[in-house]
Amino acid sequence: MPLGEFDLIDRFFRRPVRRSPLGIGDDCALLAPAPGQQLAVSCDLLVEGRHFLSTVAPQRLGHKALAVNLSDLAACGARPLAYTLALSMPRVDADFLAGLAAGLHALADAHDLDLVGGDTTAGPLSLCITVFGEVPPGAALLRSGARPGDEIWVSHPVGGGLGDARLALEVFRGTLALPGEAFEQVRRAMELPQPRVALGLMLRGVASAAIDLSDGLLGDLRHVLRRSGAALAQRDGGTAGDGVDALGATLQVDTLPRSAVLAAQTDDWQLRCLLTGGDDYELLFTAPCAARGLVERAGQRSGVALRRIGRIDSAPGLRLCDAAGRPIAFEGQAFDHFRA
Ligand code: ADP
Ligand code: MG
């Protein structure tokens, strides 16, 4: 007999909770943030064919679905507490579910968070995860805190860089070819992103603004400029809408971290992957120059490589320049699900 809804939940998803008073099996889960902490909540929906390919191994799919959510907590400097999983799938496939659950549970264990509930239904394959984290009041990293003169930083894998996930996507699309070993490396970047949770925690009180790179560096940096510009304009007596032109940035393109695989591609592909790649799940953040030492210590203590890539300006617009300060032209856009 095929597995029913409740059998599959029991078999693959019910586990003892470690940090939550009540997990799977009741109508609600119960969460217990430490006294005085705020709850940080984020939700991400992954749809087959749009956010992941049908070729992905179930274990990697489980990892990535949770990783992209943890990355949002990381960007806010929140400590993970628990998550829920809403799952729709065309049929019950025990091998698929075992792989998916293994990927989810391994990453959850690594970050000490409980799967406390969810929903399961038949339908096209999609996963929706909501994560809950905790953060002391006033300590959350926001997109709105960047100020003129702040330096712009990005995290990256030790020995790697940004843009590899996009490179892998282009190989899947057939627009680029890579030798087997290089392809496996960038495919890992696409399918097994590492959420920078420890770094996010260490950037509390150090970074002025932060965001995780999901849609591509330029688009995500623009979000920071817009939110921070609006916050500045409001503080100066304007309305939030006045902030669109209140801030700009200069990026030094040569400093953008890139893997050996990406560095072997044409200049055009490198720029496209670095600036508009998406799916990096690294942290982009700003900090005053005076905090440089604290930033570097945060990177060392969290085991993540950091690179200083530019500066926030009071002149509106995004400027790209080379090592000598000469402007670089680039027309690419950030990833947009309704335009892609
Ligand atoms: P209800 O109908 O009251 O919403 P369900 O019958 O759908 O509850 O689910 C039973 C229990 O199993 C609930 O505690 C729910 O949170 C949990 N659950 C359902 N699906 C999942 C899933 N995919 N992962 C984890 N927990 C799940
Ligand atoms: Mg239900």
Image (spheres, rainbow, N blue to C red):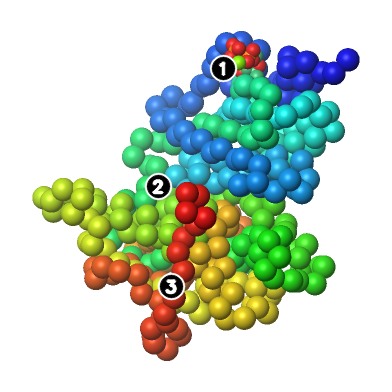
C-alpha separation, residue under disc 2 versus residue under disc 1: 27 Å
Which mark, by number, is residue 131?
none
The answer to whether mark 2 and mark 1 are in CB contact below 8 A is no
Distance, label 3 to label 2, CA atoms, is: 30 Å
Residue drawn at point x = 38 percent, y = 42 percent: 139
**Residue at the location (36% across, 35% down)?**
137
Sort mark 2 into few (<14), some (14-19) or many (20+) by Cα contacts within 10 Å: many
| Quadrant of the snapshot with the N terminus | top right
Q: Which residue, given by chain and number where applicable, does mark 3 sit on?
A: 331
Q: Is residue 42 above or below residue 262?
A: above
Q: Is residue 315 visible?
A: yes
Q: Could you tell me the amino acid type at mark 1?
A: Ala
Q: Amino acid at mark 3?
A: Glu
> Could you tell me if residue 157 is visible in this image?
no
* Residue that protrudes farthest toward the right in the picture: 1
Q: Which residue is mark 1?
A: 29
Lower sequence index among marks 3 and 1: 1
Quadrant of the rendered image containing residue 175: bottom right
Ligand 2 placement by image quarter: top right
Mark 1 residue CB less than 8 A from any atom of ligand 1 = yes
Residue 192 point in image, percent of width and height: 69, 51
Q: In x, y percent, where is residue 252?
A: 44, 77
Secondary structure under tag 2 reads loop
Report whether 73 appears left or right of 25: left
Q: Position of residue 322 (x, y in %)?
A: 45, 83
Give the mark nearer the N terminus: 3 vs 2.
2
Q: Between label 3 and label 2, give the one nearer the viewer.
A: 3
Q: Disc count in the image?
A: 3
